[in-house]
Image (cartoon, rainbow, N blue to C red):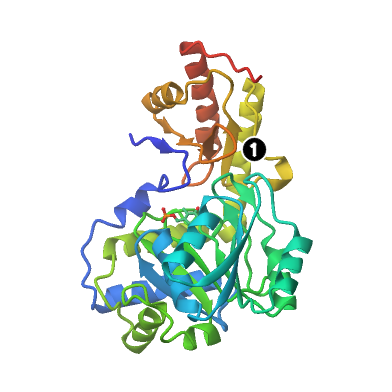
Amino acid sequence: MDKKLLTPGPLTTSYSTKEAMLHDWGSRDKEFINLNHSIRKSLVKLIDGEDNYQCVPMQGSGTFAVESMISSLTPKNSEILILINGAYGHRMKKICNYLNRNSIDYTVEEDKIHDLKKIENIIDTNKNLTHILAVYCETTSGILNPIKDIADLAVKKNLSLLIDAMSAFGALPLSSKKIKFDALAASSNKCLEGVPGVGFVLVENSVIKNAQGNCHSLSLDLYDQWHSMELNKQWRFTPPTHVLAAFHQALKEHEREGGIEGRYKRYSNNCKIICEGMKDIGFKQLLPDELQAPIIITFMQPSNFDFDKFYDALSQKNFLIYPGKLTVAETFRIGCIGNLNHKDMNDTVFAIKEVLTELQMNIKYI
Ligand SMILES: *Cc1c(COP(=O)(O)O)cnc(C)c1O
């Protein structure tokens, strides 16, 4: 029995998704070409983008897709505003530095969202800005950023918005009919419950068509990847065939569950069980409910808490949680995404109670 992954990814996947990898595909064969086409189509459909958006898959982990998006969709003379409230915002800043893109950032604490008025102020005083980079769910804390408000502001100020939607995509709503953005990046192995190895960028038609020559890198060039896939329906370089086959199956299961709405419902229920169970035990949650996305939950470490011992004991009971990533406080995280249901969540809470008793750990905060 595999351990349950209560993490932000890679995640627990269904048996049928794993089983889909038990074949070998010719990457230039019709069957694989159809499978690839179907994945791209399904992903565009998830943002209601059938007429206006293109899906460009990219080999690698999610960061490869984010780096490909930024490097390919921002011209070299861009002026970029990065909204940071966690590690993934900082990572986009780092990518911009690697790429020598001009950027400024507006950073707030990891348990806070950005002040919309202040964003507007920054835009008004930096007249040359061309792009905004934002994270939808900042997985560092699990905070839900107000992506619609940010998108509306970008429209008002005539700026391009690029979204890191990695940990939200497939579970939180993101219709391109309601939220305007130039592009978003996400991956196979978070809320879509595929296996890791491929990311994708959903990009507005005219934006990708005008993206030739921006990217410094051949392998990360989103325009080139898109252009040649449009020409001959094939990947430029070896595609992760098995990962894509699993992704295809995972997307079918996503649809069967009721799409984004269905998944949101299950994850919200998972989240509720963990939050209430942990509260009963005496743990303190970092975020107030209205900022908590049903993706991953951050808990404050009690005083004299030995996280490593706690982690190892839970792992022996087949539950893997995640260390904290906050700079402001000692924390740990429990994910509620992946192929896990209410029973798994109740089992997790039960196992945590057992572990605390076995280790004779008392939950106390000073
Ligand atoms: C997981 C994640 C990424 C990508 O991380 P990888 O380890 O490269 O897959 C990027 N942004 C956010 C918000 C994430 O949650």
Find residue 234 and report its horizontal and vertical position in percent. Answer: 30, 80
How many numbered markers are drawn? 1
Nearer to me, 92 or 221: 92
Residue at horizontal 41%, vertical 44%? 12
The residue under label 1 is: 272
* Residue 205 in sight: yes
Which quadrant of the figure contains the N terminus?
A: top left
Q: Report whether 32 appears left or right of 40.
A: left
How far from the left and from the top, in percent, is residue 343? Answer: 53, 34
> In the displayed structure, would residue 287 be above or below residue 27?
above
Tell me where residue 49 sits by quadrant: bottom right
Amino acid at pointer 1: Lys
Mark 1 within 8 Å of ligand 1, using the beta carbon = no
Q: Identify the residue at image location x=42%, y=21%.
A: 309
Q: Residue at x 57, y 14 (%)?
A: 362
Residue 289: x, y in percent?
71, 41
Q: Residue at x 31, y 87 (%)?
A: 232
Q: Residue lying furthest right in this view?
A: 117
Quadrant (top left/top right/bottom left/bottom right) for the C terminus: top right
Q: Eyeballing the image, is 194 above or below 274?
A: below
Q: Is residue 228 above or below residue 296?
A: below
Secondary element under disc 1, as helix, strand or loop, is helix
